[in-house]
Amino acid sequence: MLMPLSTKEISVTELKQLLDNEEKLFFVDVRNREDFENWRIEGRGEIPAIHVPYFELLEDADEEDLAQGVAAYAEKNWSDRLPKDRTIVAVCAKGGASALVAEGLRRLGYKAVNLRGGMDAWGNYYEFRPVVEEDELTIQQVIRPARGCLSYVIASRGEAVIVDPLRHIDEYLRWIKDKGLKVVTVLDTHVHADHISGGAALAAELGVPYHFHPYDGIHPIDVLPPQISYEMVKPDQEFIVGSARVKALHIPGHTLGNIAYLVNERYLLTGDSIFVESIARPDLGGKGETWAPIHYESLKRLLKLPDKTVILPGHFSSPKEANEKGVYAATLGDLKKSNEGLQKVMEGKEVFVDYILSSLPHFPPQYVDIKRVNIGLLKPDESKASELELGRNICALAQAYQNRA
């Protein structure tokens, strides 16, 4: 159903609802070319878009009426491309320039709205979705759609642990307070490279321990020790949360300290190891050839778990991976049939290593600094942190990206 013409802007929450409902949308994106190519808003289905940098759109505009300049440009260049039967969402970095674009398109009779806050707001949007809601166990998947990042809250009998929290810790604090939960610890599956962890800050705010594996305490490129407080996760260590048991499985490969957390022998938080469509890359420490065989052994170990084990990944590559409830999850048995990376594991080490090393996407240089941030070697301000996190994560193999459309 189209949004009413009187609507001039929508929030990122409203946009996400429209995307989930697969409403007919059309984007007009006026960011610079590099940002548009690296990072766009995605939905379950294909969403057509027009892109032109804002400064090009207004080259011949009258400074006293920029919206009319947009209308003139659109009428001249887009009359055969803009749809009358879709809501057009105007997008820029912060929501200012795109408001003028939406106004200009409305003057031509299009159902155009501005995305309030722009891509900045979209990048900082989170949602909580239930995976399990039982008397003795609740698992919430915390989704950051713009980055393809997933984190989790595991709760039982009024206690909770938070796994892989992202950097906007207020999102977790509000949710925990609303539910009346007491957090007993914060866990990271590994020291992340694709996004800034909220683990240390959240644990400090709550006055609880922060855990990750000691192998990840050393920066893999700089070979420098951490400058943050943390407690070591030991292989097979168990964390008790109410009546729930959370077991740490050491699965080196993506990093040498990579951990998966097995909840009540049924739900496996895989972090960066197994995703719904793909598997993790082993080269972000700069040692792909050395770590790929280690990655193989770890995945082979996970494949021995029961097929009914529910895989809860740390990332997703496309909104299409979500199930009918909007949750990114699948049983291990199903993934053995559909996940190409896991199928390569079953074909043996040599096949797997060749597959891995031929499938690596580019290495984002900012990932080196993000790892520095996550062990306290760098302390960026909010602007720099946002810059480092710009764009979608690239922790999965290239195949997950090639198959999106």
Image (cartoon, rainbow, N blue to C red):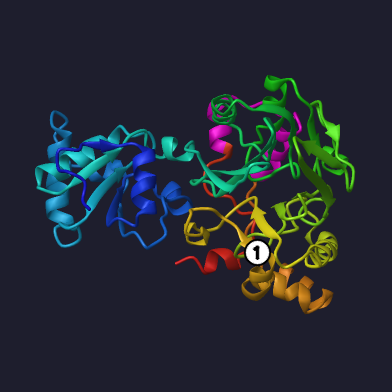
Q: Identify which amino acid the numbered label 1 is placed on.
A: Thr
Residue 225 visible from this viewpoint = no
- Is 255 rendered above or below residue 351? above
Query: x and y percent of residue 284 in the render?
Result: 73, 52
Question: In the structure shown, which secondary structural element does the residue marked by tag 1 occupy?
Answer: strand
Residue at the (41%, 56%) spot, across then down: 43
For the question of whether residue 188 can be seen, the reply is yes
Q: Which residue is mark 1?
A: 331
Give how far across and how far down residue 300 sits, in percent: 82, 67
- Residue 289 as seen in the image, left or right of residue 389: right
Range of magenta residues: 366-387
Q: Quarter of the image for the C terminus: give it.
A: bottom left
- Foreground residue among 187 and 400: 187
Q: Reply above or below: 355 against 398.
A: below
* Crowd tier of the residue under label 1, counting other residues whose Cα lies within 10 Å: few below 14, some 14–19, many 20 or above: some
User: Which residue does the image show at 61% across and 54% down from the upper left?
Assistant: 394
| Residue 90 x, y percent position in the rendering | 28, 44
User: Is 125 one of the magenta-colored residues?
Assistant: no
Residue positioned 30% across, 32% down in the render: 96
